[in-house]
Amino acid sequence: MIVFDQVSKRYEGGYTALAGVGFEIERGELVVLSGHSGAGKSTLLKLIPVLERPTSGVVRIGGQDVSSLPKRAIPYLRRNLGLIMQESRLLFDRNVFDNVMLPLVITGHPPRDAARRAAAALEHVGLRGRDREMPAGLSGGEQQRVAIARAIVNKPSILIADEPTAHLDTDYAREIAALFASFREAGVTVLVSTHDEALFAADRPRRLVLRKGQLIEGGVVQEVAA
């Protein structure tokens, strides 16, 4: 489903964010990505939806090499991905329902089916009946739930989350972690980076651990010269 083959990412100025990273994630796996601040977690996640491209190596999604994917093809790739960032990135001038509907509106989904999907996504994350509220009136945990509903409204096969519980208290963080586990049970491939692996311990996820851009647990480590 997701394959990284000796992937490296270097930025201008010589900074190496990832060095020779190799691993494979199977369909329906729940994988937790961890590592110190600056280890390369966010960079790794951004390579999957082609928010970044590798300097070398290959990233494959469903057998397709996305490392050199033409720009015109990227939106089609992202329709099969759900992406959740540290910040909810909600539109605060639109209500909860309109925020969740946004991906379907952008892709020209039929309005009636789009509304049904948005309602189902909100129910899945525990926000049934809150659809007409504005994001500013929600707690941080509830805003993150809206972001998750927006990420799953397209029924993606892969869900990617970058520190989704970073700014939440313990109770909210546990609830969000439980949501990701439920997606895995529904057959979605889930890759989530976190600073608190204990949140997912009960679900026995597979672990990928980064240190200074190298994968030290969960895959093949490729030594790369500086």
Image: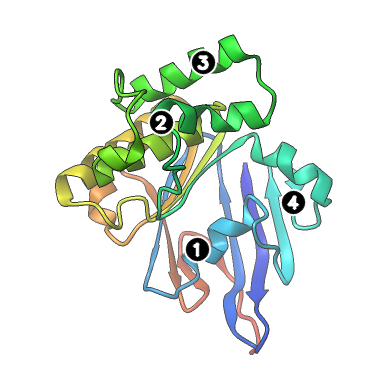
Q: From what the image shows, is residue 109 above or below residue 7? A: above
Q: Earlier in the sequence, mark 2 or mark 4?
A: 4
Q: Nearer the viewer, mark 2 or mark 3?
A: 2
Amino acid type shown at disc 2:
Asn
Looking at the image, residue 198 sits to the left or right of residue 91; the answer is left
For label 4, the residue is 66
Q: Amino acid at mark 3?
A: Ala
Label 2: which residue?
Answer: 95
Contact flag, marks 2 and 3 (Cβ < 8 Å): no
**Residue 173 location in percent, x, y?**
24, 47
Q: Secondary structure at mark 4?
A: loop
Q: Secondary structure at mark 3?
A: helix
Under circle 2, the secondary element is loop
Q: Where does residue 130 sit, x and y in percent of width and height?
A: 30, 24
Q: In the rendered image, which residue does mark 3 sit on?
A: 115
Q: Nearer the viewer, mark 2 or mark 4?
A: 2
Q: Which residue is mark 1?
A: 42
User: Of callouts 1 and 3, which one flags the residue occurring earlier in the amino acid sequence?
Assistant: 1
Q: CA distance from mark 2 to mark 3?
A: 14 Å
- Type of amino acid under label 1: Ser
Q: Can you say whether 175 is above or below 15 in the image?
A: above
Question: What is the CA distance from the residue labelled 1 to the residue labelled 3?
Answer: 32 Å
